[in-house]
Amino acid sequence: MPRNDKNRTVEGEEVIRVPLPKDNQVFGIVEQALGSGWMDVRCSDGKVRRCRIPGKLRRRMWIRVGDVVIVQPWEVQSDERGDIVYRYTKTQVDWLIRKNKITQNFLTGGLTL
């Protein structure tokens, strides 16, 4: 009889909590890696921003071209610069598409969300 009852999962659906953009945050897709923790990101508001990967994320996860991310625009130069706050996994992107948070057109290069 196993004693570790905390780690058991009930068969069926797993609960996945997907963070969504808050206040002035936007969805974005990484278009180009520039080096030194900087990326060009095409955002859902139609702007291309040069975004920085904060040190907390830089050491914890790899961000590649084509990844869907949450971008926090800077207060100064908000149309040109921003910070990458979160990177979505493939299953999370599929969930966002199913729930109509983003469209397939946005992922392939169209600007409509």
Image (tube, grey):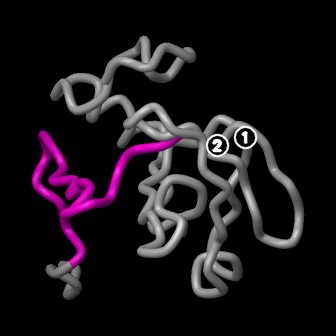
Horizontal and vertical percent position of residue 38: 76, 64
Horizontal and vertical percent position of residue 102: 30, 28
**Span highlighted in magenta in the image:** 7-29
Q: Return the residue nearer the eye: 95 or 14.
A: 95
Q: Identify which residue is drawn at 39% across, 45% down.
A: 27
Q: Secondary structure at mark 2?
A: strand
Q: Return the residue nearer the eye: 38 or 13.
A: 38
- Which residue is label 1 attached to? 65
| Main secondary structure type of the part rendered in magenta | loop
Amino acid identity at mark 2: Val
Please give left or right for residue 19 compared with residue 29 in the image: left
Q: Is residue 62 above or below residue 43?
A: below
Q: Identify which residue is drawn at 47% across, 71% down.
A: 74
Q: Is residue 90 above or below residue 111?
A: below
Please give left or right for residue 108 compared with residue 96 in the image: right
Quadrant placement of the N terminus: bottom left
- Which residue is label 2 attached to? 30
Q: Return the residue nearer the eye: 11 or 59.
A: 59
Q: Residue furthest front?
A: 77
